[in-house]
Structures are given as structure tokens and as C-alpha cells.
Image (cartoon, rainbow, N blue to C red):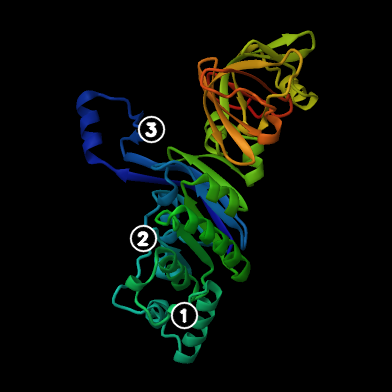
């Protein structure tokens, strides 16, 4: 059990060649290259990371490859030095504390099991280092094995186990000594889709049975949505948004979050925000949509001017039902029958779009290639983003 506080955390990887080249060329002291910020000190992998994690909370860091999530996790573990900022666990500053003294356990992507040891010996290893008495060691190992359903494999070696079983052993080795904090770095990425689903359920059950605070890293937004109490969405070393899965799904702060969270991702269209009397109106694909009173209130409070915007709508929020004055049109590229629903891929206004329609609502709709489909989305589920900055106009 532990609270964790990350305050203005920054990680810079020194790059002497960059500094020397800048001196010769007179480059700007700070710029972005390949989505990474480069300063005279080097490459900024994580920049001004701030997060408060409650006791027993399950936090998920999610983002594309190279966004800094694993680097942040490794700084919490003590495997990476912190360039600037402070890390506190239960109120104690950890920047200079050795990893072995932080009461943290970590599960890696590649299992990291000892191949010459049996499962039992792998589970016993961290307890042996701590010189735990044999009787207590057996008790803790047996409890961990029972929790993870690997009791029958205790006498086998890792090579005799499947990928899912090996990952259970890796998790067992992490939890056997009952750490305050359990860190997981993409632990399911090496498993096939079916095993990933099973292991997600196992991790959820595990979380209910042990008293650790969890930090979980993944690039898979499905894992983030199903596992996390809160999600930290990262891009280019910076936090984009922190919130519950439902909050970041319903109220994305910018187009990056909107496009990253949700499967399939949100549809985006070019549009305009105009005023009609005392009301704001969205003009998109030849249709006019009047935002709800709540959205009108947010726009008025910020005195939002008329502007070009990006209009966002999630596939599951788009309907084929006729609504006067708010219908848009697209041509079918592909239709995918998914059983209870159909995923319709459209070209609408030069943008690729996906509409998810319940099979029962199709009513004989022609979905052959090139056929025209009319659609709309309700005012309460439409999102408006500043075209210049990508920020959500309701939270700007």
C-alpha cells in the first residue's frame, strides 16, 4: 500500500553531439525534431510530469511508442535517474533511494524468468535475497501460486510453459513479497489476442486480492480502458489528459486524445462554428447542427468566436436515421459484418469515416461499394475542436 507523488518530473538523455553541433551552426537552444524536444542538455524524453496516485489505485500510462511512458515507469522503479523533479512514495523522497530499497516490484514485457530454475525457484528468488525463513517463504509462494492458478506448474521450468503461464509466473514473482507498488511494463504485448483477454481478466481479479498500488504501461487503449481507475494519456513526453476511462472517452481535451481513445477511433470532419442570433451552429458536410444547451453555455462563457473547427463524432454515436436539416452523405468503401452490428467505412467530405450500425437498424440499406449513405449525429455527442490548436472548444 502506497501513495505516489510525481512532481515536475523531467528526464533528459544527454547528447554532447547535439550541443557541439548547435555551437557551430548557431541553432536555436530548443527545438522539436522527430516529435522530441531537443535542448542544449540533450533529448527530453519526459517533460514536466505531474501526477498524484492514491493508495491502492490502478493507474495506466497509455500512448504511442516513444511517448515516454516506460521511461516514467522506470524512473519510479529507480532504473532511470530523474533529471529534474521529485518522486515521493508515502511522503518519502525517492530520487536517490536504490531500487531494492523502494519496496517496488516490476513485471517486464519479456517475462525475465530464470530458465534454469523451476517455477517455484523463480518465485522464491526475491524472498531468498531477503533471507525470508523457509516456512514463511513456502507460505507466500503457495499463496501467490494459488492466486494466479499456477500451483500445478511449480515443479516445471519456464520452457515447459505457454506464454500466458510464463507471464503468470512473472507476475507471481513480483507479488510474492507483497510490495507496496507493483509496476507493469506492457506485460501482455507478447501474448495473442485470446490470451491477452484472459490475462486482463486475471489482472483485474489479482488487483482485488492484493494491497498494492498499481502502475501499468501499455500502448493498447483497450487495456487502458478496461484496467485503469484513471488513465494518463501521453504524447511526446508530455501528459495530454488524466481522467477515468469514461471521462477521457466522453470529454477528450484535444484531437490527439479523441483519436487515440476509442476503438474504432473518432471520426473527424472539417466544419465551421457560426453564430445564428444568440445560438452557435455547427456547419459540417452541408448540414447544420445546433449544439445542446450545455455546449452552448460552455461556448458562450468562453466568448468563443466564429471559426473553422474540426468536428468529431464517435462511430457508435452516428445514426442512419433521418433527422431534418442535419443529414450528411458519404459513399461506401467497405462494410464489415460483425454479427450484431455492421462497421461501414465511408468517404465523407474527403475523410475516411466509420459508422457502427446495429444490424437490425439497416432495413435493407444498400452497402455495396460506391453506394450513397446518409447519416447524422446527435447534438449531445458532437465534439468541436479548434482547427489551429486541436483543443476541445468546451474545455479550452
**Residue lying furthest front in this view?**
364
Q: 379 or 11, which lies in front? A: 379
Residue 107 coordinates in the image, percent (x, y): 43, 63
Quarter of the figure with the N terminus: bottom right
What residue is at 51 percent from the left and 82 percent from the top? Answer: 142
Label 3 neighbourhood size at 10 Å, few (<14), some (14-19), many (20+)? few
Q: Which residue is mark 1?
A: 152
Instruction: Kindly identify the residue that appears in the image at 25 percent across and 35 percent down.
Output: 19
Residue 167 location (% of width, % of height): 43, 65
* Residue situated in front as seen by the camera: 70 or 334: 334
Camera sees residue 358: yes
Residue 144 lies left or right of residue 382; in this view the side is left
Q: Is residue 251 above or below residue 211?
A: above
Q: Can residue 91 be seen in this snapshot?
A: no
| N-term-proximal mark, 3 vs 1 | 3
The first of marks 2 and 3 along the sequence is: 3
Judge whether 2 appears above or below 223 on screen: below
Q: Which residue is mark 3?
A: 35
Residue shown at 44%/51% (left/top)?
72
The mark that comes first in sequence, 1 or 2, is 2
**Contact, mark 3 vs mark 1 (Cβ under 8 Å):** no
Give the farthest residue toward the top.
277
SS class, disc 3: loop
Q: Which residue is mark 2?
A: 110
Secondary structure at badge 1 equals helix
Amino acid at each position: 500500500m502506497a501513495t505516489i507523488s510525481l512532481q515536475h518530473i523531467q528526464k533528459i538523455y544527454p547528447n554532447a553531439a547535439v550541443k557541439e553541433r548547435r555551437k557551430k551552426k548557431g541553432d536555436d537552444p530548443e527545438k522539436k525534431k522527430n516529435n522530441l524536444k531537443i535542448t542544449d542538455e540533450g533529448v527530453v524524453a519526459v517533460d514536466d510530469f505531474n501526477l498524484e496516485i492514491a493508495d491502492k489505485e490502478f493507474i495506466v500510462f497509455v500512448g504511442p511508442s516513444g511517448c515516454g511512458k516506460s521511461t516514467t515507469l522506470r524512473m519510479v522503479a529507480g532504473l532511470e535517474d530523474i533529471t529534474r523533479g521529485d518522486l515521493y512514495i508515502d511522503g518519502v523522497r525517492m530520487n536517490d533511494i536504490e531500487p531494492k530499497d523502494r519496496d517496488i516490484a516490476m513485471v517486464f514485457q519479456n517475462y525475465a524468468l530464470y530458465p534454469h530454475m523451476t517455477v517455484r525457484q523463480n518465485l522464491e528468488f526475491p524472498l531468498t535475497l531477503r533471507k525470508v525463513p523457509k516456512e514463511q517463504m513456502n507460505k507466500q509462494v503457495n499463496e501467490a501460486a494459488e492466486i494466479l492458478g499456477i500451483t500445478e506448474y511449480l515443479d516445471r521450468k519456464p520452457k515447459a510453459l505457454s506464454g500466458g503461464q510464463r507471464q503468470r509466473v512473472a507476475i507471481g514473482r513480483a507479488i510474492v513479497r507483497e510490495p507496496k507498488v507493483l509496476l507493469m511494463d506492457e506485460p501482455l504485448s507478447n501474448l495473442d489476442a485470446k490470451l491477452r483477454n484472459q490475462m486482463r481478466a486475471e489482472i483485474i481479479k489479482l488487483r482485488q486480492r492484493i494491497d498494492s498500488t498499481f502502475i501499468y504501461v501499455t500502448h493498447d487503449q483497450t487495456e487502458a480502458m478496461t484496467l485503469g481507475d484513471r488513465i494518463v494519456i501521453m504524447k511526446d513526453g508530455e501528459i495530454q489528459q488524466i481522467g477515468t476511462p469514461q471521462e477521457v472517452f466522453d470529454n477528450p481535451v484535444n484531437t490527439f486524445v479523441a483519436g487515440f481513445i476509442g476503438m474504432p477511433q473518432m471520426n473527424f470532419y472539417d466544419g465551421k462554428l457560426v453564430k445564428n442570433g444568440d445560438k452557435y451552429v455547427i456547419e459540417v458536410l452541408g448540414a447544420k447542427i445546433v449544439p445542446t444547451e450545455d455546449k452552448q453555455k460552455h461556448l458562450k462563457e468562453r466568448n468563443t468566436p466564429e471559426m473553422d473547427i474540426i468536428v468529431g463524432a464517435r462511430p457508435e454515436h452516428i445514426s442512419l436515421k433521418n433527422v431534418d436539416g442535419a443529414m450528411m452523405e458519404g459513399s461506401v468503401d467497405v462494410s464489415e459484418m460483425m454479427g450484431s452490428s455492421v462497421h461501414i467505412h465511408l468517404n465523407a467530405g474527403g475523410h475516411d469515416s466509420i459508422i457502427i450500425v446495429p444490424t437490425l437498424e439497416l432495413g435493407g440499406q444498400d452497402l455495396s461499394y460506391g453506394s450513397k449513405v446518409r447519416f447524422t449525429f446527435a447534438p449531445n455527442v458532437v465534439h468541436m475542436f479548434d482547427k489551429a490548436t486541436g483543443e476541445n472548444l468546451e474545455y479550452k
